[in-house]
Image (spheres, rainbow, N blue to C red):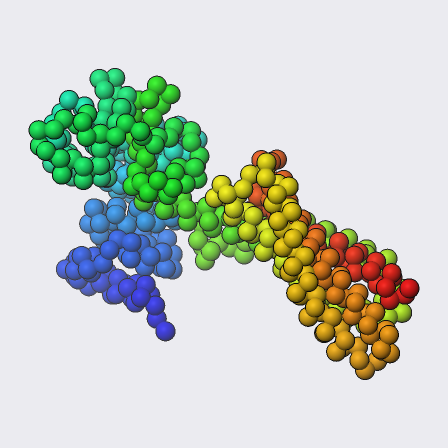
Amino acid sequence: METRTEALLTELRNALQQPDGALKDLLEAYAPQDLAEAITLMDSSAEQAHALMQMDETVASEILEYLEPSLVDEIFEHIPLEKAARLLQLIPADDAAQIIDELDEAKANALLQQMAPPEAREVRELLEYPENTAGRLMVRQYVRVRPDWTAEMALDYLRQVGSEIETIYYLYVVDARQRLIGVCSLRDVVVSDPSKRIEQIMETDIIVVHPETDQEEVANLLSKYDLLAVPVVDELGRMLGIVTVDDVVDILVSESTEDVLKLGGVEATEEPYLRQSPWQLVQKRVRWLVFLFVAQLFSGAVLRTFDETIQEVTALAWFIPLLIGSGGNAGAQTTTTITRAIALGEVRWQQVLRVMMREFRTGLLLGGLVGAIGILNALLWTRAGYPWDAQLRIALTVGLAQVGIITVATTVGACLPLIAKRLNIDPAVMSAPFITTVVDASGLLLYFTLARLIVFS
């Protein structure tokens, strides 16, 4: 069944083949976000460029804002330099900076030279800041007012400049040296007495960030304090710009995607999945896959060590997938939970012992519940080929091993992300495949050690 975006793509292709009026009507009927999704589904960057070239530049620039920068880079290969520069001038400087950052240096410089000097200068200034920081994300257009203005004066000024500014929900109060001294919400100004001075309305307890602040920290601040924008100031407290909530949503999606991929042992990429070649996909996965393959050799070594034990009681081999699978799953659950708690600031390195003991107790309880099921399962599977005494010994081995494996898995799974954070490694790297590999080797060792003590005693 055709999706909504696929249906829109069909409409767009049909409109591009008809007189200009059909395309204009279609563009007016849909939001730029929807049109961007449809264009992303087109077969080639040449077709995408052709579609954008047929549109009004204002509409085309709005669509560019919602396309991946790497995709825009490919599209610009089929658009004349002057046209591409005009489109970039029409979008916010922070979005333009992200697009230009994807280009090779020669083409980036050529585009900047074609842009109007004020817009080009603003983009260059943003590109001077490190990647993934507030400086790269901020916009310099914001409502700036003086503390001695009245509410009426502020609203009059807002009417004059509001159409040129991306976000008008906050009015930032600066002194003669452009230092941020307060902030007013638009609501507070509107409902205040027109003659009331801004300094009587403004809040002086302000949440601010610096240009070098990591983008994820900016996103967390906006989320924590329910802000629509956060001001960016220099070391002297002077206003440089603001980071808006729409950019933060993009950050959260990007960071979440990166964390999910790392949990699967895959390197993150900004390029859409269907635009990546098989070789690119191999490059993103092979490093961790080889590492995990080598790590699994330890599990093989454990099995070889206990080869005689397995030959004497083959039933022990029946329960290996059950025990190792449940242990790996328990460890993955714990690792994911702790990684998320670290990201939200709920746990810190100083609490590592508390977290370990908590997960140790949790592992005992989970192991006891699952181990009881394992005992019943072992009794059921061995009733045909083994005497009652052997059945009990095998069942007890399986049950105790299950308790031990799950307890080890939850305890180790709790420690690894915290250790990684302490070593300034992304905790998401201590992912489900990694903990599963650790549990495999330790679980087999524990299982067969118990078997020698119980079954062969």
* Whether residue 168 is visible: no
Q: How many labels does the image show?
A: 0
In the picture, residue 165 is in which quadrant?
A: top left
| Frontmost residue, 396 versus 113 | 396
Q: Residue at x 33, y 43 (%)?
A: 226
Residue 207 visible in the displayed image = yes
Looking at this rendering, what residue extends furthest in the top direction? 177
> In the figure, is residue 343 to the left or right of 33?
right
Q: Where is residue 19 in the image (x, y as percent from the top left)?
A: 16, 61
54 to the left or right of 413? left
The x and y percentages for residue 189 are 16, 35
User: Measured from the top left, where is residue 321 in percent x and y?
Assistant: 71, 66
| Res 163 quadrant in image | top left
Question: Which image quadrant: the C terminus?
Answer: bottom right
Seen from the viewer's position, the closer of residues 323 and 42 is 323
Residue 273 or residue 106, whichever sits in front:
273
Quadrant in which the N terminus appears:
bottom left
Q: Left or right: where does residue 170 sit relative to residue 386?
A: left
Residue at 40 percent of width and 44 percent of height: 251
Residue in view at x 37 percent, y 53 percent: 45
